[in-house]
Amino acid sequence: MRDINTLSEPLEFNGVEVYDVLRFFKGDAPSCQMETGHQKGGNFFCWVCGISCSQVSDYTYAAYRSYLSFEYRQQKVLQTKRSTDLSKRKCLNLYSTKKRVELMDELDERGLGKKYRSHDSNKVLEQILKVEMEGIQRVPSLLFNNPEEDIGSSQLQFYEVLGCEPLHDVVGHIRNIFEEIPAHVEANKDILTFLTTTVFDGKEAKNGSDYRHAVIKAYLHFRNNYPTHVITEVLSTL
């Protein structure tokens, strides 16, 4: 977080001042949910827009959902005194309470008093709160130690948590490219062995990082042996 706070201070390169802007966090779904302060799974599992699982098949509705920014999440949590106090005490799940009085106070302070009746069950109150919070459980992780920190001064106004899993997604592209290459270069058998075994150091079980490492090795190989080939250009994009 200290590094992020100093992003407003430029780096000098050959006499030119360079200002860095932090725009996104990379990771898989559980880590993205943790990063944004979102619940893990459940009926509001999407950390990007907080859509209900019952509406994800409605593509028109989903397309018009707004991105839940860090600022929105912070303001949403700090809207009530109880949530603010719990955030300062570093509570992980602000809305896991089963106490009726706390649920009613939370709803009332959020202006939702008209959505329930005094004799409604806790289950009804909990559901109203879940819909209102859209899966938000706490402030984003980078604000966890200081929930009320100003987004602008902390350089988090551009911080974006992606709605995809970049490393996992690119694995499929790399695999497809590797399968396609032998049909476009000479010495097919040697190339096939190289792309299926050599670049993976003989590993049988391969994860995302293995594929990222493999594509770097493949690019270097083709750059040295086929510098003008279109495959070299394709690999360079990965």
Image (spheres, rainbow, N blue to C red):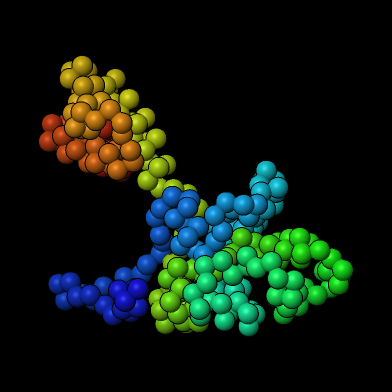
The number of callouts visible is 0
Q: Quadrant of the N terminus?
A: bottom left
Question: Which quadrant of the figure has residue 13?
Answer: bottom left
**Compared with residue 92, is residue 61 higher up or lower down, i.e. above or below?**
above
| Residue at image point 24% right, 37% down | 214
Instruction: Give residue 235's position: percent from left, percent from top.
Output: 27, 38
Q: Residue at x 60, y 77 (%)?
A: 83
168 with respect to 210 (left or right): right
Is residue 84 in sight in this rendering? yes
Q: Is residue 78 left or right of residue 163?
A: right
- On screen, 238 above or below 116? above
Question: Which residue appears at 31% of the width and 34% of the height?
Answer: 206
Most distant residue in the front direction: 99
Residue 25 location in percent, x, y? 40, 59
Residue 128 occupies quadrant: bottom right
Q: Residue at x 12, y 36 (%)?
A: 224
Between residues 10 and 139, which one lies in front from this camera angle? Answer: 139
Task: Name the residue nearer the viewer: 223 or 161.
Answer: 161
Look at the image and tell me in which quarter the C terminus lies: top left
Q: Is residue 180 left or right of residue 67?
A: left
Q: In terms of depth relative to the viewer, which is nearer, 147 or 27?
A: 147
* Residue 132 visible from this viewpoint: no
Q: Could you tell me residue 151's position as x and y percent?
A: 47, 78
Residue 220 percent across, percent down from the top left: 16, 39
